Image (cartoon, helix red, strand yellow):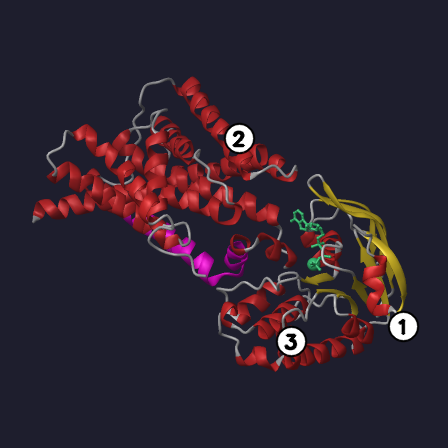
Amino acid sequence: MRDLLELSVSAAASGCIYALVALAYLLMIRPTGVINFAVGEWAMVGAFGGFLLLSKYEWPYALGMAAVLGFMLLVGWITERIAVRPLVERGAPLLAAILALLGMLVVFREGISLGFGPDPHQVPEPVSFEYLKLFVIGATLVVFAAVWLFFERTLWGKAFEAVALNRRAAALMGIDLRRVTVASFAGGAAAAGLAGLLVAPNTSAHYLMGVPLAIQGFTALVIGGVGRVEGALLGGLLVAFAEQLTVRYAPLPSGYAQGVPLLLLMLFLLVRPTGLLRARA
Amino acid sequence: MLRLSEVHASYGAATVLHGVSIEMGAGETVALLGPNGAGKSTLLAAVTGTIRSRSGSIVFDGAEIVRAPAHRIVQAGVRLVPEGRLVFSPFSVEDNLRLGALRLEGELSERFDYVYRLFPRLAERKKQPAGTLSGGEQQMLAIGRALMSRPRLLLLDEPFLGLAPLVVHQIRSALEKLRASGLTLLIVEQKLDIALAFASRAYVLIKGAVVLHDTTADLVRRANLADLYLSLAPRG
Ligand SMILES: Nc1ncnc2c1ncn2[C@@H]1O[C@H](COP(=O)(O)OP(=O)(O)OP(=O)(O)O)[C@@H](O)[C@H]1O
Ligand SMILES: [Mg+2]
């Protein structure tokens, strides 16, 4: 029983990390249709930001966290200006932006590996280790509640949703599509950076940490559906529980557990490509 | 108030408008006629900044807007009620109207009152998702939503398409009230009888060019008007 409880808390905490990455995808996909696989590298940048400010310069956690999130907003903003806007303005297809962002992924990864070297770097935890998982869960719930309120209760949230529903109609309302796009990238980068910062005390900051996170987050997104914010949270939790239950109870060598999300991904793409939660239509 | 000179517009490699010039004064009601695919909707897209590739000159109230982004054009006072209405189906009537007022400079409640008075049906259905409205109600919502930012020029793309006669009548009388209030209207319509009765002048657009432009009074006097599209349409 105790064993199961521990497993649940631990799965919920990793599920929250995946959920934040899924949220990052979702914030960008909804208004623009662009799948940005660089979210994993953004998480890595967040983790290295944590290493730099919290380990190296020993800033207090709250201050360091705020600075990292602020920096991530900037990273998202710049990424959009460099890799997305010039293409959109020339009328290039979405695929062009997706590919340009894959290019950015490599730039981020190699930049970090040049700057910090290939070794993992320790990132401190915000609270004592036994409460770390609860902190991760709490922080994630706060973020999801805030994003949910933004979309459901604020006019600008409605405007974002309007862009997701119909870009042309949204433009005819006087919504500035460029501003919505850049804001969605900034928000996506902040969500991904937070995931990296929160996972780093367990995994350390490492220049190769991005791709697995990007895959797990994408799986969570596909399972939960891109239609609603809650879907990202649900999907993240499902992926993590499936992973950890397999490791714990299935007679598989531990390496195979990493295949579980991919198996789930394929299953959902075949059986229910819209995800569990449908968009309100 | 609005002057288009030599406007070209294209989707990718396909040029749809080949140098269109149109002019309308403040308070005028002008009809834009033409067969399917003539480029009427494209012309409205060019005026509202929602087609990427556009050139020439579009002057609204003395300001050149041909390069302006769509939201600036809304801000300047031009609103389009698009073909197919494009209401935000999951959102309530009220939220649709609220989004319409994003660029409103002025009092919001006054605008809500104005639209609800024009279309009492919308007031009754405030909380209902727009997707569950009837076609006619959706058209009322699309018009109401455009009025929320207090535009000075209203562009209407086939507002009566697919509607029952009773609803056509209701929407028409609402538009007549708008016209009487001094709002400048440009209406795209395929049905000649409605368009000619409603507007004071009309342009006929065929294959992306203006082929005819006259007062509706003179157009009505042409005996062969019904054959006009056919005779003007390039053969083959
Ligand atoms: N998004 C688009 N991409 C490519 N071509 C388009 C697009 N929209 C319209 N066209 C083409 O442009 C031409 C003019 O279309 P437009 O919609 O402006 O005509 P219209 O006069 O409004 O016709 P209708 O009366 O049927 O609404 C057509 O040949 C159409 O196929
Ligand atoms: Mg049309």
Pointer 1 residue Cβ closer than 8 Å to ligand 1: no
Closest to the observer, A142 or B101: B101
Q: Amino acid at mark 1?
A: Ala
User: SS of the residue at dot 1?
Assistant: loop
Mark 3 or mark 2, whichever is nearer to me? 2
- Mark 1 on the same chain as mark 3: yes
The location of residue B217, given as percent across then percent down, is 90, 74
Left or right of residue A175: residue A206:
left
Q: Pointer 3: what residue?
A: B115
Chain part drawn in magenta = A137-162
Cα separation, mark 1 vs mark 3, equals 40 Å
User: SS of the residue at dot 3?
Assistant: helix
Query: Does the rendering let one see residue A60?
Result: no
Closest to the observer, A8 or A133: A8
Chain under numbered label 1: B
The location of residue B108, given as percent across then percent down, is 62, 71
Chain under numbered label 2: A
Cα separation, mark 1 vs mark 2, equals 60 Å
Left or right of residue B206: residue A17:
left
Considering every residue shown, the one lying at the far left of the view is A1
Give the mark nearest the N terminus, 1 or 3.
3
